[in-house]
Amino acid sequence: MVDLRGQYLALKEEIDAAIAEVLDSTRFIKGPIVGQLESELAGYLEGTYVLGVANGTDALQIALMALGIGPGDEVITPSFTFIATAEAAALLGATPVFVDIDPQTFNLDPAKMEALLSPRTKAIVPVNLFGQAADMDPILDLAERHGLYVVEDNAQAIGSTYKGRKTGFFGHIGILSFFPSKNLGAYGDGGAVLTNDAALYERMKMITNHGGRHKYYNEIVGVNSRLDALQAAILRVKLRHLDAFIEARRQAADRYDALFAGNEAITTPHRARYSHHVFHQYTLRIAQHTPGGRDALLAHLKAKDIPHGVYYPVPLHRLPVFAEIVAMRRGEMTETERAAAEVISLPMHTELSADQQQYIAEAVLEFVEQRATV
């Protein structure tokens, strides 16, 4: 699905030098390299404050902690996403309230949020899924009218835009993940929280440092979550190449689009007019009426040694961990259920060649065309 080795070899000299610099300094925890990355990310994302943390899941939890989310509160989030988005709220004793998605973008459908509000609603966590921004204006408008916080889950969409502005800083807090497969990926875990609010930034700094501004003087309950200096050094190198990575992904998406054009059983990714899609994933929809459906296609690709993924086969509202919550509060999930049954993601990375894509597309088309005659 990704070619981490190919990307490393292309940047090997720069990355090895950056790692060696950290090793030579021996400043592995909270070294200056982390602050340099935070400053560079803030500049790239056109925001004010960036704080590196241990991973994207921590980033979500720290954001909600900083906003005072806790027992009795409700947090509106899509069900069609990775579990961390809702898990962070549940870990704090809050209740995730799941909302359906837009069938084209797979992102939270703003029109379906208001009906889910209650006196306990405290925050909305929109996800910029697969590399494309959620429709933020109506989300922010609803939040302002009802006095709600917005935490923008930008884990899959660094470098994307919404109406000309980089994603990540639209809410009260935004989050990033640097998981190795992300468009800006580390060589281990890593994440960041983003905000334009000085008070929230200072509070999150305390939270990530066991709840204290100074060692041994703890003011609030916090956690231990910081970005490793070696990962920061790698990310600084890769950040310089991020726009080129994104362009390579967009060109690969264009090639896929052209290869699948005109086939009614395959729906290629929608590109919303308001967002610059950075294609963390290239996700097709395979019509359910195709004989055997998506599961038969998965088996077909596996037989041809073609990597593939399903993000996400089980929506969050159907997971056993949330069964009790869902029995009490959730919206209608028609589009979420349909997407979970139809989506399949194909290999998408910066080293993907036209020949590889031709082989992949031919395998998909072979399956669809064979099934059309059944």
Image (cartoon, grey):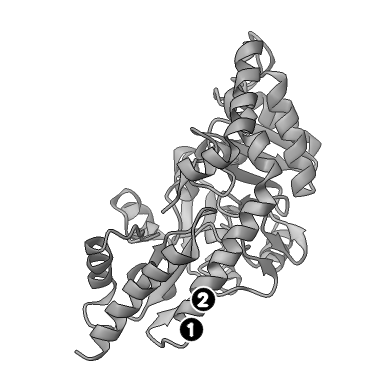
Measured as percent of width and height from the top left, residue 171 is found at 70, 52
The C terminus: image quadrant: bottom left
Q: Dot 1 corresponds to which residue?
A: 261
Residue placed furthest toward the top = 216
Circle 1: residue type: Ala
Can residue 374 be seen here? The reply is yes
The N terminus: image quadrant: bottom left
Task: Mark 1: give few (<14), some (14-19) or many (20+) Cα within 10 Å.
Answer: few
Q: Which of 354 and 228 is in front in this view?
A: 354
Measured as percent of width and height from the top left, residue 268 is found at 48, 76
Q: In which quarter of the image is residue 345?
A: bottom left
Q: Residue 257 carries which label?
A: 2
Give the number of marks.
2
Image position of 214 with respect to 332: above or below: above
Q: Nearer the viewer, residue 15 or 236?
A: 15
Element at label 2: helix
User: In the drawing, does residue 316 fall left or right of residue 250?
Assistant: left
Residue found at x 23% / y 72%: 296
Residue placed furthest toward the left = 374
Measured as percent of width and height from the top left, residue 252 is found at 54, 65
User: In the drawing, does residue 16 fall left or right of residue 298?
Assistant: right
Circle 2: residue type: Asp
Image position of 345 with respect to 44: above or below: below
Asked if the residue at tag 1 contacts the one at tag 2, i.e. Cβ–Cβ closer than 8 Å, the answer is yes
Measured as percent of width and height from the top left, residue 50 is found at 72, 37
Element at label 1: loop
Task: Mark 2: give few (<14), some (14-19) or many (20+) Cα within 10 Å.
Answer: some
Residue found at x 42% / y 49%: 83
Q: Which of 163 and 124 is in front in this view?
A: 163
Q: Distance between the residues labelled 2 and 1?
A: 6 Å
Q: Which of 293 and 11 is in front in this view?
A: 11
